[in-house]
Amino acid sequence: MRIPNAAHAAQPWRIHEFIRDFRIEDVWSFRAPGAGPDDFPVMLDALKAAYDSRKEPAATRFLFAVRWKLGALLGWDAPQAGLGSRVSSLRDRLPRDLAQTANDATPCSDPFTDVYLLDNEAARELANRTVHTIMHLGWVPTDGGGYELRMAALVKANGLFGRLYMALIAPFRYLIIYPALTRRWERAWQDRTHLLTKTNPDSASGRPGQG
């Protein structure tokens, strides 16, 4: 579910040190029943395995197909519009030891690039002609004694065009994209043992059988 932006700002995340020119677009929480303090890597691997092995709902696939088609026609996603060209990677702002943690992240076929990976938080990024966006993922204790995943979308729009683009897609994000993402990510946690065993038998650690 969507939660106040202040819930992200109040956490002592490392990401705050590097994104003063980005704004918080959205903050969402995702349930992880039975999760413990050391399960953040398991959750991340389950999310990536679900992306690589399961189809999005039809409505989400349609929206992304339209977006990628428009991007191809208008050059929004051309190499010169992305990381290392139009904008520098956030990794360039990090101390070397923190930037090197991205090398330990599990690969995924989604369009995001890993920025850093710690025991309780991670950052991934994407840039094109419209925005430079950071997806920050954090592992937070809940009042009931468990843990939940939180995702913050941090955005730096590319001028007026980028701001108009973000305003245009906002209804689709809130009504279709994020509800589908919530179901997908919470399901990935519940199915983590199956997902991780299927993709990599040696990675299915964590707390199998709970959820």
Image: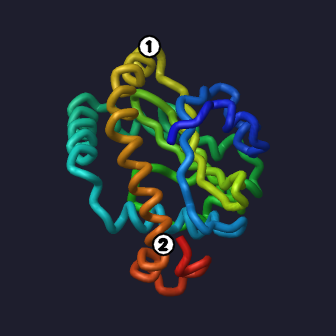
Q: Residue 107, can we see it?
A: no
120 above or below 28? below
Residue wearing tag 1: 160
> Which type of secondary structure does the marked residue at label 1 adopt?
helix
At mark 2, the secondary structure is: helix
In the foreground, 100 or 211: 211
Which three-letter amino acid code belongs to the residue tagged 2? Answer: Arg
Going by the numbered disc 1, the residue's amino acid type is Leu
* Front residue (pair 198, 163): 198
Q: From the viewer's perspective, is 155 left or right of 199? A: right
- For disc 2, the marked residue is 192
- Toward the front, the furthest residue is 144
- Residue 104 percent location from the top left of the image: 62, 67
Q: Residue at x 73, y 37 (%)?
A: 16
Question: Residue 33's image quarter?
Answer: bottom right
- Percent x, y for residue 124? 55, 49
